[in-house]
Image (cartoon, helix red, strand yellow):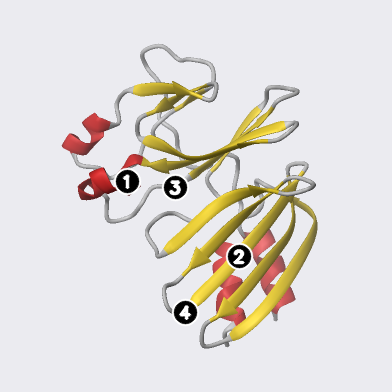
Amino acid sequence: MLIFLIFYFLFSCTTKSGGNTIKQDTQKPISDTILAPLNTKLSDSCKIISQKYFYKYGFYISKFYDVDQNISKKDISILLLKPFYTKQDYLLCFPEKADYNLLVIRDLNTKKVEIYNNLLFSDDRDVYQEIKPTKNGFKISAEQGSSSKFYSDIFISNSKVDSLKIESWGFAQYKKTYKFKKMTLNSFNVSLIDSLQTANSK
């Protein structure tokens, strides 16, 4: 059942880097600029807050985003960006459906930049997530729930997802590891974690 679920997910779900529509800068496009999403559901007063840009870690970043985490390794630099309204001072701007968090990866050798919105959970749930360096790359760790905990680790190296580990300490208690051979970062989506959690809890 779980094997079928994974294959169904891979063939039915199509994603691409930065799949969330990004608003184009009509004034003066700048290299390495991270723009606010086009279809965000913010009030006009909250949109004003995010209209400007700031420069950090080699990027011009829309104030729509806040740099939640930054790690650097020998060959790559990684940013975890969250919408500004996830911070305590702007919670009144939190929309009914949260916008995507972004993972920004820069290859320090080629200077190539990739932006992904499919590797992180959005902040419309009880979830804590962070990026951590590993021997061969990095992992995205997430913790969900309050009294009933669910953990996941996405292991990434060479622009591919090597494996996924999930662990439940709720009503159903289990640990599972799923290994992948050719899973690109564009192909993976955190919705697979939700699907596996549901399937393993039955």
Looking at the image, is mark 1 or mark 2 earlier in the sequence? 1
Neighbours of disc 3 within 10 Å: few (<14), some (14-19), many (20+) = many
Q: Secondary structure at mark 1?
A: loop
Look at mark 1 in the image and give the residue it sits on. Answer: 87
Q: Which residue is mark 3?
A: 100
Measured Cα–Cα span from mark 3 to mark 4:
25 Å
Rendering coords of residue 14 (x, y %) = 61, 52
Amino acid bearing label 4: Ser
Q: Which dot, 3 or 1, sits closer to the camera?
A: 1
Q: Nearer the viewer, mark 3 or mark 4?
A: 4
Q: Residue at x 41, y 73 (%)?
A: 146
The answer to whether residue 164 is above or below residue 14 is below
Name the amino acid type tagged 3.
Tyr
Given the current orientation, which residue lies at the most extreme top position? 28
In the rendered image, is residue 134 in sight? Answer: yes
Three-letter residue code for mark 1:
Lys
**Quadrant where the N terminus lies?**
bottom right
Q: Amino acid at mark 2?
A: Ser
The answer to which of marks 3 and 4 sits earlier in the sequence is 3
Residue 37 lies left or right of residue 43; in this view the side is right
The residue at which mark 2 appears reads as 152
C-alpha separation, residue under disc 1 versus residue under disc 2: 24 Å
For the residues labelled 4 and 2, the Cα–Cα distance comes to 14 Å
Q: Say whether residue 92 is left or right of residue 106.
A: left
How would you rate the neighbour count of disc 4 (Cα within 10 Å): few for under 14, some for 14-19, many for 20 or more?
few
> Residue beneath label 4, please?
148
